[in-house]
Amino acid sequence: TYPVHRHITQVQTVLCVTNKCRRVINDKLNTHNASADAVFVKYDGNNEAAQDMHLWPGLVLHSCITDRKHLQNALRYMIKAVDKSKTALVKVNDTNEEIGQTFVLATSEVPAKLRLSYAITIDNSQARTIYGNVRVIQTNHAHFSLRRLIVALGRVPDASQLEVE
């Protein structure tokens, strides 16, 4: 019912089962989409969910923590400006319209506090509406279930933008 008809680089969001797959897809698409002036930030911590990333103005990330100042878990933030020492971010809604005040975060802290949003796990996509082309992958994974399929299908408001592998 939802055939794959786009190359993976033309898909805005990939829904997958595992964090390992999420990291691989995010790395591949982040590298592919990185602008020439992107700042590369290496993650040096021990959190398996965090990863190295290229950052540039206009890139949308989602928070994986809530801090007392600016970040709220699972909300989306767009980079307004970035250099090797600091990154200016602003909260955005599902259609990337700015809805908050710009704030600054140390660039070295970005991989620990924010995630790339090209791919997210199906479990983390709950309660979200995802606009644009969406592909559901890992449907043959041992932990893929009817429940996860229903959650994934319910994220997209327009079925013509959905692909299922």
Image (cartoon, rainbow, N blue to C red):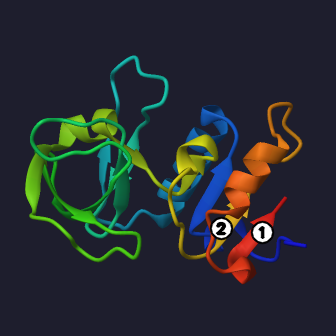
Residue 77 is left or right of residue 18, and the answer is left
> Could you say where residue 119 lies in the image, as x and y percent from the top left?
57, 52
State the residue position of label 2.
134
Instruction: Say which amino acid is labelled 2.
Output: Val
Give the percent coordinates (x, y) of residue 85. Answer: 11, 44
Residue depicted at x 29% and y 77%: 97
- Asked if residue 164 can be seen in this view, the reply is yes
Whether residue 137 is visible here, answered yes or no, is: no
Disc number at residue 55?
Answer: none
Could you say where residue 74 lies in the image, as x and y percent from the top left?
A: 38, 47
**161 w.r.t. 60: above or below:** below
Could you tell me which quadrant the N terminus lies in? bottom right
Density class for disc 2 (Cα within 10 Å; few <14, some 14-19, many ≥20) is many
CA distance separating discs 2 and 1: 6 Å
Residue wearing tag 1: 163
**Which quadrant would residue 130 be assigned to in this image?**
bottom right
Q: Secondary structure at mark 2?
A: strand
Residue closest to the far top = 46
Looking at the image, is 3 positioned above or below residue 90?
below
Between 85 and 65, which is closer to the camera in this rendering?
A: 65
Viewed as shown, does residue 149 lie left or right of 40? right
Helix, strand or loop at label 1? It is strand
**In the rendered image, the vertical position of residue 56 relative to residue 125, given as above or below:** below
Q: Nearer the viewer, residue 52 or 165?
A: 165
Q: Which residue is depicted at the point 29% across and 37% down?
A: 113
